[in-house]
Each structure stands twice: as C-alpha cells, then as structure tokens.
Image (cartoon, rainbow, N blue to C red):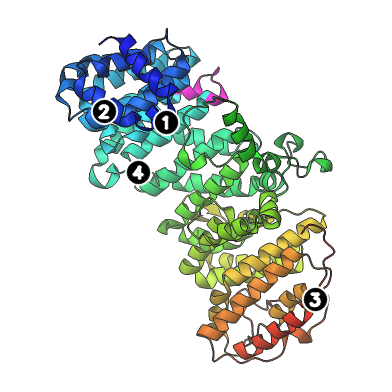
Amino acid sequence: MNSDDAERVFRELVANPAALVKGKEILEAQLAKVDTFAARTIELLVNPAVEARFRVYVGALIRNPLKEAWSTIPLLESQKNPIREMLIEGLVLNYTSLPLIDAISLIIADLIIDEGPPIWENAVRELTNWLTVEEEDQNQACLEALCNIVVSSDNRISIFVPYIMPHLFPLISRAEATPKLREKVLVLLYLAISSFSWAEDSDASVVAKCFDETYDLWMSFFLSALQTSPKSHISLKRYILKILTIIFRDLPRYSKKSLGPAVNVIWKFLNQNLPLYVWSVIYDVPIENITDDLQLSDPSMIGQGKTASRISANAKEKEANSAGGFKYAGFELEEEQDYDNDVELIAIQLIELITTLLGKPILRDVVRVGVYPLINSLCHYMLMTSYDEHLWLHEPNQFINNEEDESNMRSIRNSGLKLISELINSYEDDTLPVLMLIVDKFLQGDDEDTAVAHLRAVIDEFAANGGQGRDVAGLNIDRDYLLEAARTSTFNVESQIHVWKKRETGLLILGAFAEDIVVYQARSNENFDLTRLISNVVRDLEAKETLPVLRGRALWCISRFSEVISLKHKDLSFRSSPFQSKASTPASLFPFDSPRARVSQAMPTRSRSMVFWQKILLQKSSIRSRGPNL
C-alpha cells in the first residue's frame, strides 16, 4: 500500500457520513490487515503537499485506532521506527501550522504513554533545541508540541523536564518575545512543574534536578510581574498565579524560603487588582476604558465589555460552525476554556492561591492579624457581576444552579465562600467578629472609616502584645502595614447600583454563615438577640422600592436563619418581632463595644418565623418594584 491508497481511505470516510460513523472500526481493520497502512497514514499526515485541513482530519481519525493497535497488532512492529521518525520529522515540516502540530504531537504523546518515555528521550531532547532558535514560529510549534506531550503523559514524563526547563527562562526573557509566546512558555512551565511536583515526598532529587537551576530566577520574575500596574501583563499574571499555587501547594518544603516575600506581594496584589476587577467584571467595562490609575474614563461604557459578547458567544459559535469555520488558537488549559475575561481568571486563581497559603502553619499570625483586610477585599470580589445579573433576569435556573453547586470553584462567589469557611474553621474567634463587622458595613452602606475605627482597636491590641514591627514569616508586620492593607481592601462608587450590590453581597454572606454566627453568639453571650439584624433584613421585604433581586436574597437569608434556629437551636427564645422596627436607617446590626464584638441580644424561634411567612404571603400582591430590570 502507498500513501495514495491511504489517502483514498480517509477521503471516503470524510466524504461519507454513514461510513464516518463506523470510521474507528474501518481503520482498525485496515491496521490489522494491511501491511503498511499505519506507516502510509503517518506519511500522509506529515506531507506538506496535502491540504492542511484534510490532514488534521486524518490525525484526528487515526489517533485512537493507532493508540489501541500499537502494542496489540503484530503488523505494526516493523513500522514503529519509521513511524516515530516520521512523526518527529512531521513537526519540523509543519511548524507553521499549529493545528497540525497539535494533531501530530497528540499521537506522539499517546505512543510515549504506551511505550514509556525512555524510547522517546532522544527525540524529545532534539525537539527542545527548537526553543533556542530565533524564529518565533518554531518556538511556538515546539511549545505547542511539548505542552501536548507533557499534559497527556504520566509522572514518568519528568525525565524530559531537565531538558526543557533550562530553555524556558531565556526564552521568556528574550526582549523581542511576544506576549503570546510568553504565555505559552508559562503554560509549559506550569505543566512541567506539575509533572515533577509529586516527587517532593518520594524523591526530592527529582525536584532539585528539574528546578534548582532556574527556581530563583522564576520566583523573582513572578513577584516582579505581580508588582507592575494591574492593567499590564494581564494574560501573564493569570498563569503566574497558577504556577505559584502549584509551587506553594505541592512543593511546600522546597518553596519555604520564598514564602514570606511572596505573601507580601500577593497580599498587596489582591488589593491593587480589586478596582480593575470591579470595573471589568462587576460593571463590565472594557479594559481600554479603564485608566492607568484604575478610574472609569467614560461612564457610558458600563455594560459594554466582555459580558455582552459572552452572552451571545454560543450563538456566534454555532453560526461559525455551520458556515464551515475552522479556527485553532493553540493549546489551552482545560479549566480556562470557559472564560473570555482574563481579569476574571486572575481573580479566581488569586483566591485559589490565597486559600493555599492560608493552610501554612507559619502564616497563622499573619492571618489572625490580617483577617479584616483579607475578608473585606474578598467580599468586594464577591459583588454580583454583570453576567450574574443577566443570568438572574434571563436564566434564573442557571443562576440558582451556579450558586448551589458548591463544587463549582470557577465561581468567584463559591471560591470566596469556601475561603471564608476555612478561615472560620481555623480562626473562628478572630474571623466571625470581623465577618459580622464587614456584613454590617455592607448592609448599612457605611464608609470604610467606620469599620477601620474598630480595626484600630484590634491592631493596637496586637501591637501591645508584641506585634509592633514583628517579623512574621519574613513580613515586617506593624500597625501601619495593617492599616494600609485595610485602607486598600475596599472599592466604592458613588452609585445606587453599587449600594444594592454591596447589600446583596452582605445578605449572601450573612445567610451563608447563619449557623456559624448563631453558634458563635450563643457561645459568647447567653442573652444575645439578633432581632435588629433580622429587622434590617426584613426592611428589604417591606419597602415597596426594594429591587426584586434584594427581596429574593433577603427571603433566602431569613430562611437560612429560620432553618438554623428551628433545626439546631430550638432552645433560643424570641424576644421581639422583627416587624416592630420600621426605621429606615436602623442602628448598627452588631453593636461593637469591644475588639471581639460581643453581641448581647436574641434570635427568633421557628414559631415566630411562621408569623413572618404568613405576613409575607399576605403582602405578596401589594409588593411593587421601582427597578425595571432588577
């Protein structure tokens, strides 16, 4: 059989949908019965004289049959060496076509898994030399191939990593390197570190062999990049945060020396990135309409950013497919394929990284004294986004599914709630008073000075106990450091939209941690009463001008408290009806008379909640909203 015969087989499959359905069986039969079918197919795949699109189809069709036949069909034994050589040569011949590089390298990855990396070691080592050439197309082709090989293989692939790692930092540091090339370098670096991170507990020499030469250079590069303007290097920062997460999570001993400097930079980045996130994701403003000092250049651009295109993305994709569109943007990490806003990806990865760092015992003192600015900043990241508004209005079932799926860590809100929950589990007495203070601020619309005044007492207590200027995990923690962290952990806009968004977030957090709050207050003071809190929440139900989104969130929040009281705290007594308070601006929900914010009031019981629900049902027909959309 020659390559023309193999080409006819594939063209008949592509042209005949009925035959294509049975394509796998047809190709398996050819591999088993025709002496050189496998070799002729690979020859066709790598032949530049044949149209590229057709060859991409050939690669996709032959991949699985060849993988399953490689070690089971005797006819392939004599073809293996020629096939290996043609595949490597095919990368060279087709380096300007990323779809073909993808198709060829995926087949190589399958064969490496089947045969083991040693057989391919020299070939991969030769491939890495492409990273040293000056032509970017060859660099990109090499990075694309190596990404597919590394991500598709198991831990044995780590034998290739010492050949790959020394070339990556010089490549990303090259003055003429494009942002696209630098992104791909970081993707490969992330995959490479993932391939050997398992070895810290079993064979630390593997980690040293792979990382010792360039670790300090990379760490300096990462921390420097995170200290640049939030608007610069956005696409790089999302990968940097992913890499830092895996380094501090999977290489705790190896990375210990970098922990202090990294925490300092990451904490500041959390706050510095907040305005960009709010404008870009919460208010859907295009990046180009946000100034370098993170102000809005044109108010009319609110709602004109990524969300508008995201809403219609599925329709556009279907239209492109039906029109025969063919697009390949290169290797992409699976978890990033559902996002088109890099700023949102940065925030999601940043929260994951912070969650990883919070588990470090050496950082306990840092977390305890920094819990206010940390949670305060986090709660601003959890404001309802423009896209969530769209779902709430037009796809409410999807909105509910996203919110109730606790395993969905692609949601900023779910990730934030998980992080707060872990803080409560580890630092309950430090976290809950602060959480209630922040909830109070979000519900009441207080400015930051009101909350910071309470924070000063905590900081002064910290300083009095020897915390002033204390070196904690390489951080010089003092009063000014903490106050600056608190000051930059907020974002305010003179807008009623921002007021309701903060109130909605306050209700979300209050309801999510209803049980923790009740248990903490019951333990702190046996005479506590949260009636004023419930009164404040109920005002969202009683006021005719309340937006439906707030009314819905208030109902959910009250139901959470009712459930906690009725199921787990039936002994609590109801002191007064939440409907007794009609003040439009009620007193502080949590009276903070000490740094620990001990509250001395009580919570309604289930019997009283039944009266509440009866009143809601009676008022249902009279409720009107002045907000046309929300």
Q: Which range of residues does the magenta coloring cover?
A: 170-180
Q: Of the residues tagged 3 and 4, which is closer to the observer?
A: 3
Q: Residue 93 occupies which quadrant of the picture?
A: top left
Q: Is residue 279 left or right of residue 564?
A: right
Q: Compared with residue 111, is residue 453 higher up or lower down, i.e. above or below?
A: below
Going by the numbered disc 1, the residue's amino acid type is Leu
Question: Mark 4 sits on what residue?
Answer: 254
Give the mark count: 4
Question: Mark 3 sits on what residue?
Answer: 621
3 or 1: tag closer to the N-terminus: 1
The answer to whether residue 152 is magenta is no
Q: Residue 205 at x, y = what percent?
A: 25, 37
Report the residue at 68% width, 68% height from top: 553
Is any part of residue 453 visible from this angle? Answer: no
Q: CA distance from mark 3 to mark 2?
A: 67 Å
Q: CA distance from mark 4 to mark 1?
A: 20 Å
Q: Residue 99 at x, y = what percent?
A: 46, 22
Nearer to me, 38 or 474: 38
Q: CA distance from mark 3 to mark 4?
A: 64 Å
Going by the numbered disc 2, the residue's amino acid type is Glu
Report the residue at 67% width, 62% height from top: 505
Going by the numbered disc 3, the residue's amino acid type is Ser
Q: Is residue 184 left or right of residue 541?
A: left
| Residues tagged 3 and 4 counted as in contact (Cβ below 8 A) | no
Question: Mark 2 sits on what residue?
Answer: 28
Question: Mark 1 sits on what residue?
Answer: 188
Quadrant of the image containing the C terminus = bottom right
Going by the numbered disc 4, the residue's amino acid type is Tyr
4 or 1: tag closer to the N-terminus: 1
Q: Is residue 427 left or right of residue 500?
A: left
